[in-house]
Image (cartoon, grey):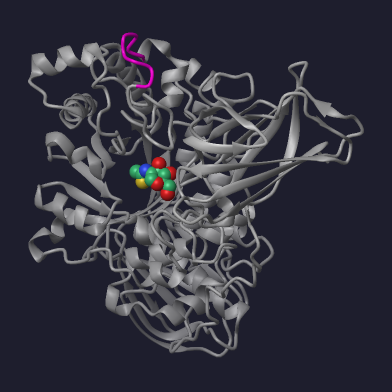
């Protein structure tokens, strides 16, 4: 147990974003004096604020440090209480408060402080709403995503196991073994769905090449005697086998509801080729094993893109051999480190990044499951960690607070007029080429605030020379150079929707993710970009799932119950002639709210499967109650 505990509550105030009340308890045996209290809070205290009982000594992005009144002594068992009125936004949920806390004592040592979620003053919390109904099915098959076509007759007893018919090729046997291993990782307590040798009471699978069907498609024909699996590529083979494992999983787990087919066919193929899930590992770091398990879960849900958000303001998580500082400095947080403690960090310094060996392991794991790993380094904005790790990236003459993108650090964008920026990125891309076989590299491009770089003398010169009118055109200049660097290296550029600002980049081989709303995506498609829809209102899995205070998650895009994610149609009013441009949809898992595993699971599941079904199944074949009945048997992290 920590010697100190900090409790925080919030009360609404007419005409403002309300007031925080903090109480620090001294649980140690010694009186506490001559200290400061540091904490990270998602809701920030504004520069203009009224403090009672403390002063805000400094604030850097979400990091706050408070000093008690001169001479304050907190006795053992005693507490210190203070309030802050004047916040940058109004908190909406329990998770909007403290994410890390520690004390700096008189002698410079740092002491851990425990804390909990943000309380709402004077309000009963009440029970949280049920987010998932029990569900019901009209056809007894546990397939999720639901297939394009099926006409099946259920059998009474599921087969004991499925096994490859005599004479099955090594490639197909290996595919069975692969899905068997996947199943064992996801459901270690369950009976296995496959065996490699014939099993009494089992059913054999016969494999058939089916050159007339499209990529990732498969056909299953069931007879009492065998199952014929027709595919034309490795993805179809994988998905056909996963469907068989899913059918057995349901029939065994809930035999009153689900059965295994004895006759009939499934003819299945995905609605979209890009069925993605993004993971922000900058705000919250996930060990290799967690990332691999998430990829297992993606494959089980037939998602095929893992968009790996490896850098942001808070941390740079990818080892780059040419610049070891990026992870030595830029992936480490601590009270006396260059990067201050953030979400979930405490008094002890803590570091987390992926070595190039880790990356190779993850990419190989994903590749085996037909998941393409699309790495993102978020530039030019969201780059505090890189800028603090490599001071050569900083424009020395630029005013230190030239622009201030809340909630991030001031001047958090790579400077397009600093030539070293391109040398640096060239080397980063060169190393990424060796690690990531994907044809795509995501370069972010989001949230560069208006006014960025305008206090940079070097940018002023560049603007004159290149006849650029402001921030957006500077950004476009930068991104066009980045695009050329990627093209030179044989890669396609992926970015967030703001890449199109100020003239954008060459459309050819550029894919943009519309996160602000689907209309933005439609506009971009009209401008000639390929698009993927990642609407914050429906597919951001960090968004809270109900309005209730007690429901964890972010609130900036409202709240998103699983049913909303499920029933959302991301194409919106996409005109027929732009359909070609829409490559797919994607869920995004931003990390600010995921300090605990239980919050991760509560927020990500079942909404991730809801996006997976939207990515695979035609809109008219979706069915919320069927989804609810099946998804409760699906794995979580
Ligand atoms: C917006 S979406 C962001 C992220 C945050 C997220 C939180 C986007 C391109 N930028 O930096 O983590 O909201 O929901």
- Would residue 19 be seen by someone viewing this image from the given angle? yes
Question: In the rendered image, which quarter is residue 432 located in?
Answer: top left
Residue shown at the point (18%, 49%) measured from the top left? 530
Q: Main secondary structure of the magenta part?
A: loop
Above or below residue 259? Residue 98 is: above
Judged from this view, the residue extending furthest toward the right is 29
Q: Is residue 108 above or below residue 186?
A: above
Give the left or right position of residue 486, taking residue 167 as reference: left
Could you tell me residue 558's position as x and y percent? 41, 61
Front residue of this view, candidates 586 and 39: 39
Query: With 112 as the anchor, is 606 left or right in this view?
Result: left
Q: Quadrant of the N terminus?
A: top right
Q: Judge left or right: residue 597 versus residue 365.
A: right
Q: Quadrant of ligand 1?
A: top left
Is 397 contained in the magenta span? yes
Which quadrant would residue 2 be assigned to in this image? top right
Residue at (36% x, 60% y) in the render: 537
Q: Residue at image x 45%, y 76%?
A: 627
The C terminus sits in image quarter:
bottom right
Residue 253, percent across and down? 62, 77
In the depicted view, which residue is nearer to us: 300 or 503?
A: 503
Please report the bounds of the magenta region as a residue range: 394-401
Q: Find out whether residue 581 is within the magenta segment.
A: no
In the rendered structure, the answer to whether residue 483 lies left or right of residue 554 reads left
């Amino acid at each position: 147990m920590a010697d100190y505990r900090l409790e925080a509550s919030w009360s609404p105030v007419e005409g403002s974003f309300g007031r925080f009340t903090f109480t620090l308890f001294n649980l140690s045996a010694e009186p506490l004096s001559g200290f400061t209290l540091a904490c990270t809070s998602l809701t920030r205290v504004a520069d203009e604020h009224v403090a009672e009982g403390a002063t805000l000594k400094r604030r850097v992005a979400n990091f706050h440090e408070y000093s008690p009144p001169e001479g304050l002594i907190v006795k053992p068992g005693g507490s210190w209480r203070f309030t802050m009125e004047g916040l940058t936004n109004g908190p909406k949920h329990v998770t909007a408060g403290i994410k890390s806390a520690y004390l700096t004592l008189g002698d410079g040592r740092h002491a851990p402080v425990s804390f909990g979620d943000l309380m709402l003053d004077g309000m009963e919390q009440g029970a949280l709403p049920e987010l998932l109904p029990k569900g019901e099915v009209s056809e007894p098959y546990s397939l999720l995503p639901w297939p394009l076509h099926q006409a099946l007759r259920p059998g009474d007893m599921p087969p004991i196991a499925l096994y490859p018919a005599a004479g099955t090729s090594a490639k197909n046997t290996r595919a069975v073994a692969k899905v068997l291993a996947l199943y064992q990782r996801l459901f270690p307590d369950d009976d296995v769905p496959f065996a490699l040798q014939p099993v009494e009471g089992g059913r054999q699978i016969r494999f058939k090449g089916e050159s007339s069907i499209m990529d990732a498609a498969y056909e299953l024909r069931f007879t009492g005697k065998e199952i014929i699996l027709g595919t034309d590529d490795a993805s179809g083979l994988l998905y056909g086998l996963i469907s068989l494992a899913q059918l057995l999983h349901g029939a065994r787990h809930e035999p009153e509801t689900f059965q295994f087919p004895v006759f009939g066919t499934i003819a299945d193929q995905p609605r979209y080729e890009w069925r993605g899930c993004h993971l922000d590992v900058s705000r919250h770091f996930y060990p290799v094993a967690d990332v691999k398990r998430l990829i297992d879960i993606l494959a089980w849900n037939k998602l095929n893109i893992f968009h790996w958000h490896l850098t942001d303001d808070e941390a740079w998580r990818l080892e780059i051999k040419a610049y070891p500082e990026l992870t030595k400095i830029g992936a480490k947080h601590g009270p006396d480190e260059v990067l201050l403690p953030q979400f979930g960090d405490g008094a002890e310094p803590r570091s987390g990044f992926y070595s190039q060996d880790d990356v190779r392991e993850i990419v190989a794991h994903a590749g085996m499951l037909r998941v393409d790993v699309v790495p993102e380094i978020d530039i030019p904005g969201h780059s505090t960690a890189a800028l603090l790790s490599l001071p050569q990236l900083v424009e020395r003459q630029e005013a230190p607070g030239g622009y201030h993108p809340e909630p991030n650090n001031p001047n958090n964008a790579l400077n397009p007029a600093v030539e070293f920026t391109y040398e640096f990125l060239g080397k980063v891309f060169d190393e990424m080429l060796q690690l990531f076989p994907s044809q795509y590299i995501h370069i972010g491009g989001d949230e560069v605030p208006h006014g960025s770089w305008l206090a940079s003398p070097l940018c002023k010169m560049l603007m004159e020379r290149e006849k650029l009118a402001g921030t957006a055109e500077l950004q476009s200049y930068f991104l066009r150079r980045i695009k050329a660097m990627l093209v030179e290296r044989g890669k396609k550029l992926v970015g967030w929707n703001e890449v199109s600002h100020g003239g954008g980049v060459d459309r050819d081989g550029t894919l943009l993710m519309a996160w602000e709303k689907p209309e933005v995506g439609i506009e971009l498609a009209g401008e000639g970009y390929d698009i993927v829809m990642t609407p914050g209102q429906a597919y951001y899995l960090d968004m809270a799932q109900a309005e209730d205070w007690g429901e964890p998650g972010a609130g900036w895009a409202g709240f998103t119950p699983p049913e909303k994610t499920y029933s959302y149609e991301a194409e919106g009013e996409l005109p027929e002639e732009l359909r070609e441009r829409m490559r797919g949809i994607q869920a995004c898992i931003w990390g600010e709210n995921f300090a605990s595993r239980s919050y991760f699971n509560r927020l990500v599941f079942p909404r991730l499967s809801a996006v997976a079904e939207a990515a695979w199944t035609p809109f008219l074949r979706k069915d919320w109650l069927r989804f609810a009945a099946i998804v409760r048997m699906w794995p979580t992290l």
